[in-house]
Image: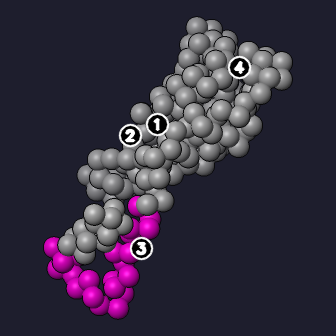
Amino acid sequence: MNPERQIREAVTTILEAIGENPQRDGLRDTPARVAELYRERFSGLHQDPQDALASGFEEGHQEMVVLRDIPFYSMCEHHLLPFFGTAHIGYIPRGRIVGLSNVAQALDILARRPQLQERLTTQMADALMNALKPEGVAVVLDAEHLCMLMRGAKRPGSNIVTSAVRGAFRSRPSTRAEFLSLIHGR
């Protein structure tokens, strides 16, 4: 069966199960809209972040590169509700660098899957390590989860911060401190 058709049928079933009429004016196109949303939001399941990072090139640069405040959007796999925030990503190249938009694209690919923030953080760090073979990588994600805001704990304003450090960022506290000072703008 066609995946979009399956999603449309499932959304129709959910609307009926909550006591709504899926044929009323405001809801008639909702199953198709949700199917389109899910096709886009989960497109990362069929993409490899390594493809986005493959276009690196030799530049000879061996100092820290930091991308700060990269917005990202993902879907929590526990409730299929969004979580969103900013990513801060740093790496120390061993001469090989990658276009900065490619780093953001790799993050998007990983975020467009049913995810856990902890897994997303780890996967991003590992993708950069595998693709660039840098001296080290650091990734910090700072996000709000709608499941924390809308249900269960109901704690608006609560952010979840996760980090993954590899190589020099793990073994050298001064390197980790430099990265943290750069992402916090000090």
| Quarter of the image with the N terminus in it | bottom left
What's the residue type where badge 1 is placed? Leu
The residue at 48%/31% (across/down) is 123
Determine if the magenta segment contains residue 28: yes
* Whole-percent x, y for residue 102 in the image: 67, 40
Query: What crowding class fits label 4: few (fewer than 14 Cα within 10 Å), some (14-19), or many (20 or more)?
Result: many
Q: Residue furthest bottom?
A: 25
Mark 2, secondary structure of its residue: loop
**Disc number placed over residue 120 in the picture, else none:** 1
> Looking at the image, is 151 positioned above or below residue 97?
below
In the depicted view, which residue is nearer to us: 170 or 2?
2
Give the residue number, with chain letter if any, for mark 2: 116
Q: Residue furthest top?
A: 171
**Disc number placed over residue 92 in the picture, else none:** 4
Q: What span is colored magenta in the figure?
A: 15-38
> Looking at the image, is 164 positioned above or below residue 149?
above
Q: CA distance from mark 1 to mark 2?
A: 6 Å
**Is the residue under label 2 in contact with that under label 1 (CB below 8 Å)?**
yes
In the picture, residue 53 is in which quadrant? top right
* Whole-percent x, y for residue 59 in the image: 83, 23
The residue at 83%/18% (across/down) is 60
In the picture, residue 160 is in which quadrant? top left
In the depicted view, which residue is nearer to us: 109 or 54?
54
Give the residue number, with chain letter if any, for mark 3: 33
**Is the residue under label 3 in contact with that under label 1 (CB below 8 Å)?**
no
